[in-house]
Image (cartoon, grey):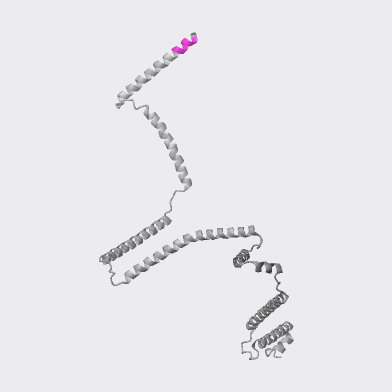
Amino acid sequence: MDLHLNDDWATSAVFSPSLARQQQHQAKEWSYIDQWLQAKYHPRPVPPFERNMDTLRALTALAAANEAADEERASQLEFKQNILSSYRPKRPDDKIIRIREGLNRDAGKALDSVASASVKLGADLGNVSQNREALLYLTKEECQIEHSILPEEQTLKTLVADIQEAEESLRKFHSEAYETPKDLPAKLAEWTRTIKILQQKSAEYKDRATSLQNAYRRNPPRYTIENLVELENEILELQDHVRSLNGQVKAYTLLPPDPKAAQRKIEEAKEELEMLKSQREELYQGLARS
């Protein structure tokens, strides 16, 4: 028996028992593969092939799968043979034969139709209600399928019409009678100019955006959210102060523009104020006496 060992097997096995066991295992696998290949190729010789570990692994897996398939095929064949050997066709009942012979041609056809329908519906031949329910269910399913097909048919008709229209347009374009519009060169030139202008504008806008981004990176804004909040509070305080000043200024709006006249007006107002104060004191004293 050819073990397919290399030349240094004996010397390496002496110094490495694990390597020796591995090589013995490989030799057994190669022997099994050789026998399997010879059985498969019999009576022809096994064609030469490269012997290495990859080939050994592939052939081992192939042989195992082949044997598993052979075993499954054999078990299926045995199962079929057992079924066929155990099958015994039943002889029809004499009563059924006599009833069938007593039916006329139309009745026989009707009975065959009912039996065929029951078999196709998967219902009991003698259960009329079950057959009726099965027929109603199939009728309902048929109607639902027909209704669901209608939109698809309409879509198909639309697609066919579009395809025909496209084919007609294509034939028209390829025909000799078709002529390009006279203003097509002018339009093409205009479109080309427009495209060039848009490309220039696009490049210009990109440059502007890049310069703005660079400027923003070089000089970021000095204000943060906290600074803005502080500024807002200061502005609110200034607004309150301005309101108070406006109230004070509003008291001087009735004075004349001349400073001297305004001074006299103020003096008169002070005298009037003093007079009102004296009147108030007299009223308080009168109330106290009473």
Image position, residue 146 (x, y; %): 51, 60
Query: In the picture, residue 73 is in which quadrant?
Result: bottom right
- Main SS of the magenta part reads helix
Q: Is residue 96 left or right of residue 137?
A: right
Instruction: Find out whether residue 285 is within the magenta segment.
Output: yes
Query: In the picture, residue 10 is in which quadrant?
Result: bottom right
Q: Is residue 160 left or right of residue 172?
A: right
Answer above or below: position of 236 versus 152: above
Instruction: Give the farthest residue toward the left.
Output: 182
Q: Is residue 184 left or right of residue 61?
A: left
Image position, residue 204 (x, y; %): 34, 60
Q: Is residue 93 visible?
A: no
Looking at the picture, tell me which residue is in the foreground, 259 or 38: 38
Answer above or below: position of 237 versus 149: above
Image position, residue 28 (x, y; %): 71, 85
Query: In the picture, residue 135 is in which quadrant?
Result: bottom right
Q: Is residue 30 left or right of residue 156?
A: right
Looking at the picture, tell me which residue is in the foreground, 1 or 220: 1
What residue range appears in magenta?
Answer: 282-288
Q: Is residue 230 visible?
A: yes
Looking at the picture, tell me which residue is in the foreground, 66 or 241: 66
